[in-house]
Every structure is written in structure tokens, then in C-alpha cells.
Image (tube, rainbow, N blue to C red):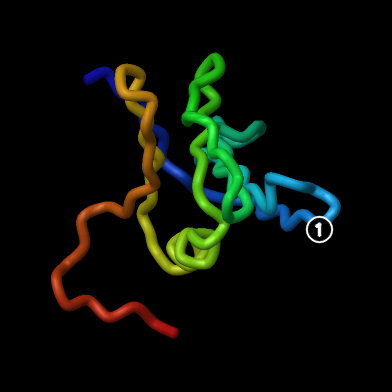
């Protein structure tokens, strides 16, 4: 299964207002320098009940799609976890955000 993978260093969160009918928020993900000038991935959050398109890769920029109810969990992961990576399978057209290996029982600071 061929995959594309990037380490994540920074993110930019956009909340959209109610005028947008299907997309409620999106998050742009950035790699560490020197590759940090433009986003390597976007996480798109669709309103509950909306049809969610398949995740995609456009010339190395990943687009992963989620339900709106997953926004708080994903945002919390971005805020608290390190290291982070984003993965995308070019054969299944599925992707995910993941932490690195962490010690079991490690407690995150508040």
C-alpha cells in the first residue's frame, strides 16, 4: 500500500459561519522548516448529514475529510500531542493524523 507521509509542525484552524452549507471548518497542516512555506495537508470538517467526499492527494497536498463532530478531538490532538504525522494511502484513498510512539501511561500536562 503506497503512502504519503509528512511530519506536522504547525496548523491553522478556520471556523466557517452558518452561511456555508456543507463545510463547517478546516485545518491547514504545515511541515517543519525548510518545507513550511505552504500547507502539506488540509483536514476538512463537513456538517452532520452532509455527504463527505473521499480524501485525496493533489500533487502532494493531502485533503482528509471528517464529520463535524470529530473537530474537537482532532483539534485537541493537534494542541497536545507531539510528534504528529499525517498519512495518506494512494491505493485506498484514506488518510489519518497520528501521534508518534509514546510511553504507556504518560500523562499529558493540562
Image check: 46 left or right of 16?
left
Image check: 73 left or right of 91?
right
Question: From what the image shows, is residue 106 above or below residue 35?
Answer: below
Total numbered labels? 1
Residue at the (37%, 32%) spot, across then down: 94
Q: Nearer the viewer, residue 30 or 44?
A: 44
Residue at the (53%, 67%) spot, across then down: 72
Q: Which residue is at the far front? A: 49
| Residue denoted by label 1 | 18
> Mark 1, residues whose alpha carbon is within 10 Å: few (<14), some, or many (≥20)?
few
Image check: 42 left or right of 87?
right
Q: Position of residue 45 (x, y in %)?
A: 59, 49
Question: From what the image shows, is residue 106 above or below residue 92?
Answer: below
Q: Quadrant of the C terminus?
A: bottom left
Q: Which residue is at the far bottom? A: 110
Q: Position of residue 56 (x, y in %)?
A: 49, 25
Q: Which residue is at the far left? A: 104
Local secondary structure at mark 1: loop
Q: Position of residue 58 (x, y in %)?
A: 55, 18
Q: Nearer the viewer, residue 104 or 93?
A: 93
Question: From what the image shows, is residue 40 above or below residue 45?
Answer: above
Residue at the (21%, 62%) spot, across then down: 102
Q: Nearer the viewer, residue 61 or 63?
A: 63
Q: Which residue is at the far right? A: 19
Q: Is residue 29 visible?
A: no
Image check: 30 left or right of 13?
left
Quarter holding residue 30: top right
Residue at the (56%, 50%) spot, across then down: 10
Q: Quadrant of the N terminus?
A: top left
Q: Is residue 27 visible?
A: yes
Q: Position of residue 29 (x, y in %)?
A: 56, 43
Amino acid at each position: 500500500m503506497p503512502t504519503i507521509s509528512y511530519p506536522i509542525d504547525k496548523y491553522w484552524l478556520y471556523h466557517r459561519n452558518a452561511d456555508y452549507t456543507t463545510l463547517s471548518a478546516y485545518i491547514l497542516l504545515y511541515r517543519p522548516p525548510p518545507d513550511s512555506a505552504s500547507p502539506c495537508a488540509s483536514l476538512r470538517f463537513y456538517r452532520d448529514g452532509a455527504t463527505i467526499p473521499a480524501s485525496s492527494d493533489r500533487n502532494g497536498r493531502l485533503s482528509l475529510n471528517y464529520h463535524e463532530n470529530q473537530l474537537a478531538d482532532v483539534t485537541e490532538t493537534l494542541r497536545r500531542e507531539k510528534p504528529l504525522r499525517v498519512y495518506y494511502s494512494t491505493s485506498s484513498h484514506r488518510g489519518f493524523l497520528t501521534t508518534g510512539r509514546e510511553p504507556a501511561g504518560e500523562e499529558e500536562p493540562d
